[in-house]
Every structure is written in structure tokens, then in C-alpha cells.
Amino acid sequence: MQPLPEGVLRTEVKNGENMKKHRIVFATGNAGKMKEIRLIMEDLGCEVVSMKEAGADPEIEENGTTFAENAEIKARAVWNCTGDIVLADDSGGEPGIYSARYMGEDTSYEIKNQNIIDRLADARGGERSARFVCNIAAVLPDGRVLHTEAAMEGQIAMKPAGCGG
């Protein structure tokens, strides 16, 4: 397990204890992400909803300088609307915390990914190394904030593969 940045806590929930009486709100409008989250969390025995389903639609400006700061900004904004347990993530690879805005927010991931592959056309081996980082912030009903962060190391493929994300 890799060390986390200073101020980031690693936590775990054991067997869904005390979760049945809480609703968990995810600060996302991404239906595909919500489908995955519900599958992952179905054994907790609590309601899991998107921010839209919770009636929250805050204007969120991700102006942090780290994945942790941006995740917390999103979670705190939704928590201010609901008071529930709120989770939010921020993640990316190149170019770091600006990944979602890379080449413009309206540019598809397919186009963004192809651009990176094209830029690395002559790169081989270690020159194609990659790192994907994800931080998840949780704001609890009492306002405390917990974080977890992990990174996945890999290499950029020579061509696109797979589907669905």
C-alpha cells in the first residue's frame, strides 16, 4: 500500500456497521459511475443516491490544487445541501488535476485518449509510463472529512482497446 499525501487519512467501514440508518450521496451526475457505485456498495444495506437524486445541484468550482482538495470541494458542496454522508472523487492521469478539462470539457474521452496515443507514437517502454490517481473524500453528517487516495501505475497502449470506460 502506497503512502498517502500529508493530511489524507485511510479509513475503512467494517461490515456496514451503523450504515443502515444513513443515506450515502455521491457528488456525481454520471449515471454510469452511479451504476458501478451501487453494485460495489449493495451489501452495505443503506440507500445510495446521486446528488441529483438527493435534490442537490450546487454550482461546484473545482479550483483545488490536488485531487484531494477537488474531491473535498465537491463533497462539501453537496453536503452543504443535504447534510448526509457525501462521497466525491477526483481522479486523472495527464495532465494531473486538470484531466477532465484536458482539450476542453466537451471533448470526448475517445478523442482525448487518441490524442495522447498519437503524441506518444514514437515512444517505447518506459517512455509510455502512466499513472492514474484517484482520491475519494467523504464528508460525514457531523462535518468531519475523511480521504483515501490510491494510484495505479501502467503504460499507455499503442492503440485504444476495450469499451465502456
Image (cartoon, rainbow, N blue to C red):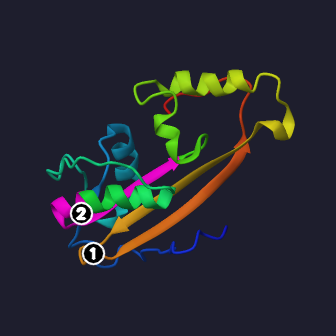
Q: For residue 84: magenta?
A: yes
Counting labels gives 2
Q: Residues within 10 Å of mark 1 (few under 14, many from 20)?
A: some
Name the mark on residue 79. 2
Q: Which mark is residue 143?
A: 1
Could you tell whether 79 is left or right of 153 in the image? left
Identify the residue shown where x is 46% and y is 35%: 101
Q: Identify the magenta region.
A: 78-91
The amino acid pointed to by label 2 is Trp
x and y percentages locating residue 41 in the rendered image? 37, 59
Residue farthest to the left, as pictured: 55
The answer to whether one can see residue 137 in this image is yes
- Where in the figure is residue 89, as x and y percent of width and height? 42, 54
Disc ID at residue 77? none
User: What residue is at 75 percent from the left and 27 percent from the top?
Assistant: 120
Query: What quarter of the picture does the N terminus occupy?
Result: bottom right
Q: Quadrant of residue 105?
A: top left
In the displayed structure image, the side of residue 10 where residue 130 appears, left or right: right
Q: Amino acid at mark 1?
A: Gly
Q: Is residue 47 visible?
A: no
Query: Which one is earlier in the sequence, the residue at label 2 or at label 1?
Result: 2
Q: CA distance from mark 2 to mark 1?
A: 8 Å
Tell me residue 49's x, y (percent). Answer: 24, 53
- Is 129 placed left or right of 94 in the picture? right
Q: Position of residue 142 (x, y in %)?
A: 24, 78
User: Callout 2: 10 Å neighbours few (<14), some, many (20+)?
Assistant: many
Q: Secondary structure at mark 2?
A: helix
Indicate yes or no whether the magenta region holds residue 146.
no
Q: Residue at x 77, y 36 (%)?
A: 128
Q: Are marks 2 and 1 in contact (CB under 8 Å)?
A: yes
